[in-house]
Image (cartoon, grey):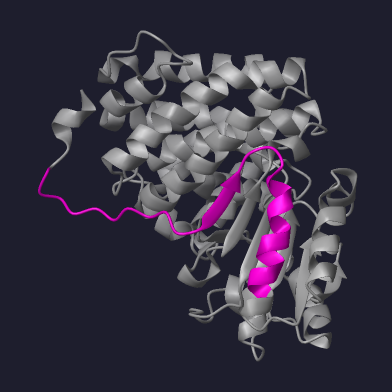
Amino acid sequence: MWEDRIDPNAVVEIRARSICYLGAGTIGKTGFIAAELKKRGVKNALVVTGKGSHIKTGAWDKVKAALADEGVGYFLYDKVTPNPTVDQVDEAVAGGKSVGAGAVVAIGGGSPIDAGKVAAILLANPARSARDVCGLAFAPETAVPIVAVNLTHGTGTEVNRFAVVSIPENEFKPALAFECVYPAYSIDDPALMGKLPERQTVFVSVDAVNHVIEACTTTVASPYSIGLAREVVRLVAKYLPLAKKDPGDLRARYFLLYASMIAGIAFDNGLLHLTHALEHPLSGVKPELSHGSGLGIILPGIVKEIYPAKGEVLADVLSPIVPGLAGKANEAGSAAAGVRGWLTAVGIPENLRAEGFTAGDVAKLVNLAFTTPSLGVLLGLSPVEATREVVTRIYETAM
């Protein structure tokens, strides 16, 4: 068992810092949250959203009414796209500055919330730009308060210190981690998620699974991140088929959302490694690529590479989707094949060619993995040495 390899003398850090309200109807907590912002002296807020989900879900009606009831004004920026860019963040911040925004309310999935986190840094550091933050030109220590109203069950960004915003001219998609961007309050309301399309339901759920497969196998993984990982995989394996069958199944949405939330906590603790380090170049080059799809396509090749080093952990964590593994190094191929079979069954494309990539893209992707700001940190957390040869092999397998 993997427990036998845990050193009781090793000191690990356990994080769970945001206040998150989970359950159907928790969007009603926005009234309390708006009152708390007012107590902090917030007179106006920057509201960051995508182009439509905040309206379609009804979340904006609730948030707008809550802000109005407490006399908190706002500037609404509703232009965030999937894989948000530094230019979108700078544009949002300009709007926030125009009303003297003292907080950020981000409504949506990972893209609006991540963009909102970077915007919160810039509102507290007005001489800086989004390129400064995402290019790691400085290490921010302050941000205005952040409220996250989450509308998908995948990223976990509503409960952790991570954010992803792209620098398009370099095709860089860095993974940012700053203490100052933990949301003060978050809303995880499964009743807002019944209209998620099937493809998005699959992609965000697979994102959560990838988070924990990495978090339980990094060089800084702990019993906490490993235990959370096992539960996430179990829950997604059980409830994703139910949500696909009936998008309005509230119980299925609840447990997928809970799985996503604890996956966010898992990688806030155990961090990430190869899968995210190699996917970010994919959606940096092709912003239209769904992050969850890219992750799912490259995951089997990564499982094959790391299984000899982390077989006991992976045999346990993967057991709900790949039963019968014993954790032996010679199972690497069958473990990878089992993961690929499950991913294909839930709706992930079989290879990168299906997403428009070719073998000729491999060298560029490898270079981006090693040159994009912050991704070197993730590569350094891999349980096997992340050499260019290993990274090349993973991309080639995914082709």
Residue 60: name its quadrant: bottom right
Magenta stretch: residue 28 in it? yes
Magenta stretch: residue 340 in it? no
Residue 371, position as x, y percentages in the image? 52, 62
For the question of whether residue 285 can be seen, the reply is: no
Residue 308: name its quadrant: top left
Residue at position x 42%, y 21% in the image = 318
Residue 93: name its quadrant: bottom right
Q: In the shown orientation, is residue 301 left or right of residue 187?
A: left
Residue at position x 51%, y 56% in the image = 160
Q: Is residue 396 above or below residue 35?
A: above
167 and 218: which is toward the camera:
218
Residue 159, position as x, y percentages in the image? 53, 53
Q: Is residue 298 above or below residue 287?
A: above
Magenta region, residue range: 8-37
Image quarter where the C terminus lies is: top right
81 and 300: which is toward the camera:
81
81 and 381: which is toward the camera:
81
Q: In the shown orientation, is residue 302 left or right of residue 132?
A: left
For the question of whether residue 200 can be seen, the reply is: yes
Residue at position x 63%, y 39% in the image = 23
Residue at position x 28%, y 43% in the image = 222
Residue 52, position as x, y percentages in the image? 89, 50
Q: In the shown orientation, is residue 372 left or right of residue 194?
A: left
Residue 148, position as x, y percentages in the image? 66, 58
Image quarter where the N terminus lies is: top left
Q: Is residue 277 above or below residue 211?
A: below
Q: Is residue 146 above or below residue 152?
A: below
